[in-house]
C-alpha cells in the first residue's frame, strides 16, 4: 500500500543518458579508437569495438526499452568524427543516420537532448593540436553550425560540450584520456578553449535556431574537508573545488576565467547558458597533503564508512546531490540533471543509490528550485573509457560478445518512478528496503519487507 509519495511536477523529464563512442561501436576515425589500439591504456586491454551496436541499429531496441519503461526523454551525443571525417568535409549519410535515431526517439515519445561533444575528437583534429590548437574554436563552431543547421527541426535542447573540466583533467593532467598529458598549464588552456568553443557554439546555435535551449553538461564533484576543524583541510577542499567545480560555469556566467591565481576576461562567454546541465555522481573528502604536489597538495578519498560501489569508484552520498543542486541554483538558471548513476554489475547498490538521489532531487523541486529533468547514466552498460567494460552503469546489463541485454532490477524501479512521476514508500520498500528509513523518515516499512 502506498503510504506516501514524492511527486514531481507535470512535464518533468525522465530519461537516461548515453554518448556516441560509448554505445555506437566502430568509431574508427576518432582519437579514442587509436588510444584503445595502443595497448596498456584501457583496463584489461578492452576495446570499444561494436560497443552496444547502436550504429548497426541496436539503438532501436534500446530506445524501445527506454520508452516502454515510462521515460519521456533521452540524452544522446553526436560523433564529430562521423559527421566531419576530414576538415570541412561532411558525411551526409552520417547526418542522416543521426536524423533517423533522433526521429526514432521522438516517435517513441522521448524528447531528445543532444550533446555535440562528449570526450571524442576526429583524428584530423587531434593530429592538428586538438583542444590546444588556436583554431579549435572555429573548427568546433563550423561543425556545430552544420549539425544544428541540419537537425534544428527535431532538437531543441542542445548540450555543447560534456564535462569540460573532466575532459581537461583526464586528458591533460591525469593522462588517462588521450592525449595522455600531465601539464597543469595545458589543462588550463584546454578548459579555456572549451569555454570559448562553448560560447561560440552558444551564439551560433541561437543564430540558427532562436528558440533553442543551450547549455553544457558540468561535472560537479562534492569535496568536503576531511577534518572540518583543520584550516588546511578546509582551505585545500575549497581551493580544489574552485579549480574543478567553479571555473567553467563561472566563466560561462560572468565571462571571467580564474585559475590558480591567473585571471582572464572572456566577455563572449558571459551569459551563455539557457539551462544548467548538472552531472553529479559522488562526494569525496579532501585532506591537505604535502607529499602530493601533483594534485595541488590535496588528497581526495572516500572515508572508511562510505557506501561504496563494487569497484570503489563511487561513494553513495545522496546529500551531495542536494549540495550540488544548491550550488548550481546560485546561477539562477533552470537545471537539468544531465547525469547521475553508479557502476554496479550486481545491482546491489544501484536501487538505493537511485531512490535516495531522486529523493534529494524531489527535495529541491519541492523548494521550488527550477529542476526540469533527470537523466540516469546509463540506459545499458556501455564502454567506460579507460575503465573499459570493467564498470557497468546500465539499467540493462550487456553481454558484450552476444549483444544480449538483461534487465536489472533497477530498471524496474526506475520504470515505476517514471510512470508514477514520483517515488513512493511502496517502491522503496520493495526495491531498497535498507534505505527506507533514510528516504522516508518517520514512515513505517510495510510488514514483510526486510530492512
Ligand atoms: C561521463 C560519462 C561516463 C560516466 C561514468 C561521466 O563523467 O560523462 O561518459 O561514462 O561519467 O564514468
Image (cartoon, rainbow, N blue to C red):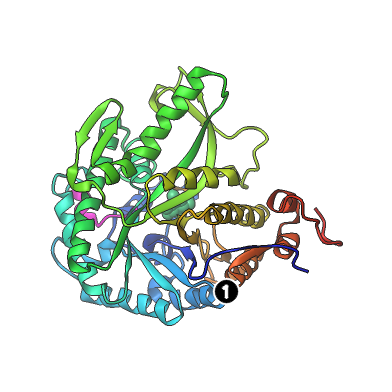
At x 39% / y 25%, what residue is drawn? Answer: 296
Say if residue 288 shows up in the picture. no
Residue 360 point in image, percent of width and height:
58, 51
Rendered view: 60 above or below 304: below
Residue 150 point in image, percent of width and height:
22, 74
Badge 1: residue crowd in 10 Å (few <14, some 14–19, many ≥20): some
Q: Which residue is mark 1?
A: 69
Q: Choose top left, top right, bottom left or bottom right for residue 25.
A: bottom left
In the image, taking residue 422 as reference, residue 15 lies left or right, namely left
Q: As drawn, which residue projects farthest toward the bottom?
A: 107
Say if residue 354 shows up in the picture. yes
Query: Which contiguous range is marked in magenta?
Result: 119-127
Rendered view: 151 above or below 4: below
Q: Nearer the viewer, residue 8 or 382?
A: 8
Q: Nearer the viewer, residue 409 or 47?
A: 409
Q: Nearer the viewer, residue 78 or 405?
A: 78
In the image, taking residue 143 as reference, residue 295 lies left or right, namely right
Residue 189 point in image, percent of width and height:
23, 38
Q: Secondary structure at mark 1?
A: loop
Asked if the stretch drawn in magenta spans residue 241, the answer is no
Q: Quadrant of the N terminus?
A: bottom right
Asked if the stretch drawn in magenta spans residue 123, the answer is yes
Rendered view: 230 above or below 142: above
Rendered view: 236 above or below 124: above
At x 58% / y 44%, what residue is drawn? Answer: 319
Q: Nearer the viewer, residue 269 or 115?
A: 269
Q: Choose top left, top right, bottom left or bottom right for residue 407.
A: bottom right
In the image, taking residue 63 as reference, residue 447 lies left or right, namely right
Ligand 1: does it lie within 8 Å of the C-beta at label 1? no
Amino acid at each position: 500500500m502506498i503510504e506516501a509519495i514524492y511527486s514531481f511536477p507535470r512535464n518533468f523529464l525522465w530519461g537516461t543518458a548515453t554518448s556516441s563512442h560509448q554505445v555506437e561501436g566502430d568509431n574508427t576515425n576518432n582519437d579514442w579508437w587509436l588510444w584503445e589500439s595502443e595497448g596498456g591504456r584501457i583496463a584489461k586491454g578492452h576495446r570499444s569495438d561494436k560497443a552496444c551496436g547502436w550504429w548497426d541499429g541496436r539503438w532501436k531496441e534500446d530506445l524501445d526499452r527506454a520508452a516502454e519503461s515510462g521515460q519521456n526523454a533521452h540524452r544522446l551525443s553526436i560523433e564529430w568524427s562521423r559527421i566531419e571525417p576530414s576538415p570541412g568535409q561532411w558525411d551526409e549519410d552520417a547526418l542522416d543516420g543521426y536524423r533517423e535515431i533522433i526521429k526514432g526517439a521522438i516517435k517513441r515519445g522521448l524528447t531528445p537532448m543532444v550533446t555535440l561533444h562528449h570526450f571524442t575528437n576526429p583524428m584530423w583534429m587531434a593530429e592538428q593540436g586538438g583542444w590546444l590548437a588556436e583554431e579549435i574554436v572555429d573548427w568546433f563552431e563550423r561543425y556545430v553550425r552544420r549539425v544544428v543547421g541540419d537537425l534544428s527541426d527535431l532538437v531543441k535542447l542542445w548540450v555543447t560540450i560534456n564535462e569540460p573540466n573532466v575532459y581537461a583533467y583526464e586528458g591533460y593532467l591525469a593522462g588517462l584520456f588521450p592525449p595522455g598529458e600531465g601539464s597543469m598549464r595545458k589543462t588550463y588552456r584546454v578548459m579555456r578553449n572549451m569555454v570559448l568553443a562553448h560560447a561560440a557554439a552558444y551564439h551560433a546555435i541561437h543564430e540558427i535556431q532562436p528558440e533553442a535551449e543551450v547549455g553544457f553538461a558540468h561535472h560537479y564533484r562534492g569535496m568536503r574537508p576531511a577534518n572540518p576543524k583543520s584550516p588546511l583541510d578546509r582551505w585545500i577542499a575549497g581551493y580544489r573545488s574552485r579549480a574543478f567545480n567553479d571555473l567553467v560555469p563561472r566563466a560561462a556566467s560572468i565571462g571571467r576565467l580564474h585559475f590558480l591565481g591567473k585571471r582572464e576576461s572572456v566577455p563572449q562567454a558571459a551569459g551563455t547558458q539557457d539551462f544548467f546541465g548538472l552531472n553529479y555522481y559522488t562526494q569525496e573528502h579532501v585532506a591537505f597533503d604535502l607529499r602530493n604536489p601533483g594534485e595541488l597538495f590535496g588528497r581526495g578519498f572516500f572515508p572508511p564508512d562510505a557506501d561504496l560501489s563494487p569497484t570503489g569508484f563511487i561513494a553513495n552520498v545522496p546529500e551531495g546531490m542536494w549540495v550540488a543542486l544548491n550550488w548550481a541554483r546560485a546561477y539562477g538558471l533552470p537545471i537539468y540533471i544531465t547525469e547521475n548513476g553508479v557502476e554496479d554489475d550486481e545491482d546491489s547498490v544501484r536501487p538505493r543509490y537511485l531512490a535516495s538521489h531522486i529523493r534529494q532531487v524531489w527535495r529541491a523541486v519541492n523548494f521550488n528550485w527550477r529542476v526540469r529533468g533527470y537523466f540516469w547514466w546509463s540506459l545499458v552498460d556501455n564502454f567506460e573509457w579507460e575503465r573499459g567494460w570493467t564498470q557497468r552503469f546500465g539499467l540493462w546489463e550487456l553481454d558484450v560478445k552476444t549483444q544480449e541485454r538483461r534487465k536489472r532490477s533497477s530498471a524496474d524501479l526506475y520504470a515505476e518512478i517514471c510512470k508514477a512521476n514520483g517515488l513512493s514508500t511502496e517502491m522503496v520498500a520493495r526495491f531498497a528496503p535498507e534505505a527506507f528509513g533514510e528516504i522516508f523518515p518517520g514512515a513505517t516499512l510495510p510488514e514483510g519487507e526486510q530492512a
